[in-house]
Amino acid sequence: MISWDKNLISDLARRKCILFLGAGVSMNSVGKDNVRPPSWKAFLENCLPELNAGSSVQIKKLIKNEDYLTACELIKSKLQKGKFDTISKEAFLHPQYTKAEIHEYLFKLDCRIVVTPNFDKIYETYVSKETEGTVSVKNYFDTDIATAVKDSGRVILKIHGTIDNTAKIIFSRSDYAKARSQNRDFYEILNALGLTHTFLFIGCGANDPDIRLLLEDAFFKHNAERPHFMVMSDKSLHKDMMPVIEETLNVNILTYKVSKGSHHVLTDSLKELVQLVETARLELKENMNW
């Protein structure tokens, strides 16, 4: 089980924490024919049969080296027009994924703001149902994000866009460059949240470009030394790399053990976290020390 930090529990109880949900969270869901949402790597590999053998060689090297942005760039450039959109929807929309138990506990943490690079609709569909449609879902290209963040209601920020609008999904190197050039206001808001709130990263990789930019900017530019938190399995990073990541990104890494390929310990640990946060909120209610 994960040993939850007292400062994290306190920030969650005071709703000063923002959840950042990566692809690892979505991969707990199951769709038609027991299909699960693919990882970024698996999705790119599934695109390769659509390319000729000569085009696949370099792309396979990029995927092996975890340069997924460039690999996606090449795949999109070599596929027939509209084919990438079709493949994307077949992978992330058409299987009709349903929420998993992990989504329930994440929702019960009752964080007002949730950030996700996932362009599937699993979490937002579940939360919309639970909140009678009162949750506000905003994409990085929307013009009223500041209003949604300042409001008192729940908001989900989709920083890579949504599968409903494949033309604006951020998936390749040029997509990132275009978004950061044309949607600077959004990234300023995201950086501001990184200074005023504690982020809890779940289901994410330490090399995610969004995470690195967000945390490095807060740490080195603004000297924000209070750490964020990142949850990952003990197999995700070499033990020698963990202190390097913690130091350069100003995060505390909370690990859990994977048993026979199953990440059930993470779900069980989140269940425990919900209980700890609820207890802390009852204490806050009694002593009024908000």
Image (tube, rainbow, N blue to C red):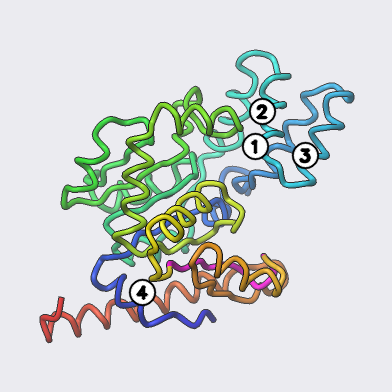
What amino acid is at disc 2?
Answer: Glu
> Residue 109: where, in percent of width, then height?
33, 67
Which residue in the protein does label 4 denote?
274
Q: Check contact, mark 2 vs mark 1: CB within 8 A.
A: yes
Which of the two discs, 4 and 2, sits closer to the camera?
2
Q: Which residues are magenta?
A: 228-236
Q: Check contact, mark 4 vs mark 1: CB within 8 A.
A: no
Which residue in the protein does label 2 denote?
73
- Pick whichever of labels 4 and 2 is earlier in the sequence: 2
> Residue 31: where, in percent of width, then height?
56, 45
What amino acid is at disc 4?
Answer: Val
- Pick whichever of labels 3 and 1 is earlier in the sequence: 3
- Pick whichever of labels 4 and 1 is earlier in the sequence: 1
Dot 4 lies on which element?
helix
Dot 2 lies on which element?
helix
Q: Is residue 137 above or below residue 174?
A: below
Specify the quadrant that holds the C terminus: bottom left
What amino acid is at disc 1?
Answer: Leu
Which residue in the protein does label 3 denote?
62
Tag on residue 10? none
Which residue in the protein does label 1 denote?
69
Asked if residue 56 is among those painted magenta in the image, a careful observer would answer: no
Residue sitting at x 65%, y 19% = 83
Q: CA distance from mark 3 to mark 2?
A: 11 Å
Q: CA distance from mark 3 to mark 1?
A: 9 Å
Q: Is residue 272 above or below residue 142?
A: below
